[in-house]
Amino acid sequence: MFHHGGRASKVPMPVDRARKLKVCHVAATTEAAVWVFEQLRDLRDQHGYEVAAVLNGDRGSLVDRLRAEGIAVYSSDFDFTGSADLLGFPRKILKLASIFRAQRFDVVQTHLFHSMVIGRIAAWIADVPSRLSMIAGPFHLETYSARWIDQWTCWMDTGIIPSCDYTRRLYLGMGVPEDRLTTIYYGPDERKFDPSVIAPANLRAELGFPDDTPLIGMVALFYTQLGVNRWTPRAVQRKSVKGHEDLIRAPPIVLREFPNAKFLLVGSGWEAGGRAYMKSMQKLVADLGLQDSIIFTGFRQDVPRILRDLDVSVQPSLNENLGGTIESLLMECPTVATRVGGLTDSVVDGVTGVLVNPGDPADLARGIIRLLREPARAKALAQAGRQRMLSQFTLRRSVDDLARLYENADRYPGRERAGYRPLVSFYRLVAAGAVSAAIVTRYVVMDTKLLPRWDVGWRPWHAKPILLARFYASLAWRLLRFYASLIPRLTLRLFRKLGGTLGSK
């Protein structure tokens, strides 16, 4: 889905249309994120762009995919959640800015929160002509710390790409003008999800179930339980974001009407925390006595074929972009999803599937039963879902919309593709230093010191004056030491690293 507001613009500077557009995508990962690979590959193959990626390291499955396709990969560092990481915040920004200036990309598009913040500041300093953030989901916009950091830096982008309508509305609520927002979905490769050519996995025979066994499945990784902090939305604190527990608690209700139904949890644990959570869910199944009804399949590579077998696909997420709903609907699999994030974009209640309340196993069971009771109606919803996905939610649509955005970027004020002006970079470097200092100061003072104390009942007007004075003096001294240690590093970095590139052509 592509939409963009218009406004009066200055006359753009001349652009060399004969030269291939150089596009770089930035992501704070080296694993999964297949959409980075697919978008870059198709932007190159279908639109003729010269493409590259900057990732959070040089080893991983995503790195391997890109290099096997002949796409250049650069390595950078995007971690900054801890106080120690903040000490290296300017260094990481300047390193990335130097990559941008050396390669002279026309478009830099960031994905994922950490790479978005560092990437947008670095691209702004480097004076990259088109600077875009594609927002992978609303998660960070529903937290305290990540939301204000985004709000303090989003003006550096020439445009923001929400990937669902809910995210777009959150940015509008933050005061971002509508004409800077272009909604484009993270569409999967539709060629991999064609029910007319993909055979079922024949799971019933594989697992020893009768042919008439109702199969309800959830395809999702197991993620760790999240903590209580200002980096986590309240709805998922002390919970796992995908909502596995809610699905595990729903079967007793479904089994009253469909006693032979089976529930398949397809996916493995993501890293140590996810594996631990998966084990806790297996224990929960045992505690509820549901071992015969709920099956953990582990990781499967034949997800499209599995979706052909399911009577109902479930996405009970507590916080989500589009989850696995696009894939299930492309495979014409009847789908139940929660009313969160972008799931309401793909699953239109009563039109392409059934929506239920998040965190509500009883309502989830109701949605599943509704589709099992009316298989003809469920099939009709799924078929309508496939048509909706093909029209708006495919990789081809995503890539075409991105290309249109790239090509139109020079039609708006401040988005001309001149770029990489030495004097502009110098002034922006100074301004970015002030912005970074402000971010670090607020994060250290508010997020790590004052607010945690406030949460446990501390109130400054109840503290003794001498203790309050000591607290603020200690905090001021720590900040002073931090900036005193930072200035020499930043100065050396400026002269050694950027000194040459600022004067380069």
Image: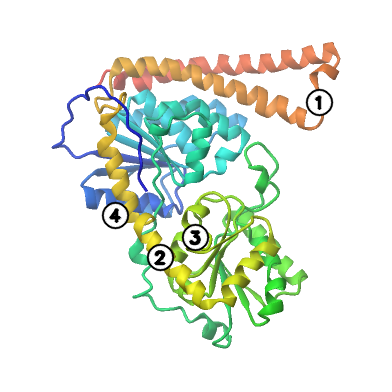
Which of 464 and 386 lies nearest the eye of the viewer?
Answer: 386
Q: In the rendered structure, which amino acid carries the disc numbered 1?
A: Trp
Q: Which mark is residue 324?
A: 3
Q: Quadrant of residue 281?
A: bottom right
Q: Which residue is mark 2?
A: 386
Viewer-nearest of discs 2 and 4? 2
* Mark 2 or 4, nearer chain start: 4
Side of 277 where 206 appears, left or right: left
Q: In the rendered structure, which amino acid carries the disc numbered 4?
A: Glu
Q: Which residue is mark 4?
A: 69
* Mark 3 or 2, nearer chain start: 3
Q: In the rendered structure, which amino acid carries the disc numbered 2?
A: Arg
**Label 2 crowding class (10 Å Cα cut-off): few <14, some 14-19, many 20+?**
many
Q: Quadrant of residue 233?
A: top right
Q: Which residue is mark 1?
A: 458
The answer for how far apart the CA atoms under marks 2 and 4 are is 29 Å
Could you say whether the residue bearing mark 3 is in a helix, strand or loop?
loop
Viewer-nearest of discs 3 and 2? 2
**Residue at coordinates 67% horizontally, 43% vertically from top-left?**
234
Kindly tell me whether residue 104 is visible in this rendering.
Answer: no
The answer for how far apart the CA atoms under marks 1 and 3 are is 43 Å
Q: Are marks 1 and 2 in contact (CB under 8 Å)?
A: no
